[in-house]
Image: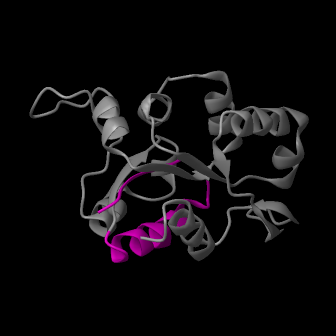
Amino acid sequence: MKTVVLGITGSIAAYKACELTRLMVKAGWSVHVIMTEAARKFVAPLTFQTLSRNPVETDAFAPVAAWEPGHIALAERADLMLVAPCTANFIAKLAHGFADDLLASTALATRAPLVIAPAMNSGMWDNPATQENLDTLRRRNISIIAPAEGELACGTCGNGRMEDPQKIFDFLRELTGNS
């Protein structure tokens, strides 16, 4: 059974992570969700707890029953780590090594393959700073599932929509050997 750490950042596309979680669980994968504070404004942790059948991590300093640093334990247990949706802010954190929340700390600590599925306004996606940060991540062998083009939450059309959950899942299956 694959163990996947799914990081969810603060984007309207967080609702797509629900379907992605369902697809991974249906395939027999063990999904462990980490949500940023901003992500919890879009979708409740209870949704992901129900879909994943695992507790949802939201706080690096939450009390634990046994001594086990949460971000390290999840980072070590992961066969794969996915951040979907991945905001421009989180891309910048990864590119510059910030570890100021549970998700960023876990992403920096894992040795598992790391995949991101960006979601943002097309202006943010096209911004040179974002593109330079993405280039940095590519050099570090982080897989990037490029966003799709279409209608964006802000009402404009352009590149920046998080890719369809089924396409993301298919990419992950291929990356991990179709199991």
The single residue placed furthest to the left in the displayed view is 65
Q: Residue at x 60, y 66 (%)?
A: 171
Image-based side of 133 in relation to 23, left or right = right
Q: Is 3 a magenta residue? A: yes
> Closer to the camera, 103 or 76?
76
Q: What's the colour scheme?
A: one colour
Q: Quadrant of the C terminus?
A: bottom left
User: Where's residue 58, x and y in %?
Assistant: 36, 41
Q: Is residue 10 at all visible to an observer of this figure? A: no
User: Residue 37 at what x, y percent from top left?
Assistant: 46, 40
**Vertical side of 153 occupied by 39: above or below:** above
In the image, 112 versus 133, the foreground residue is 112
Relative height, residue 109 to residue 131 (above, below)? above
Residue at the spot x=89%, y=46% of the render?
A: 126
Residue 164 in picture, x, y percent from top left: 64, 72
Location of residue 67 by image quarter: top left
Q: Is residue 155 visible?
A: yes
Which of 160/97 is in front?
97
Instruction: Classify the position of the N terminus by image quarter.
Output: bottom left
Q: Which residues are magenta?
A: 1-28
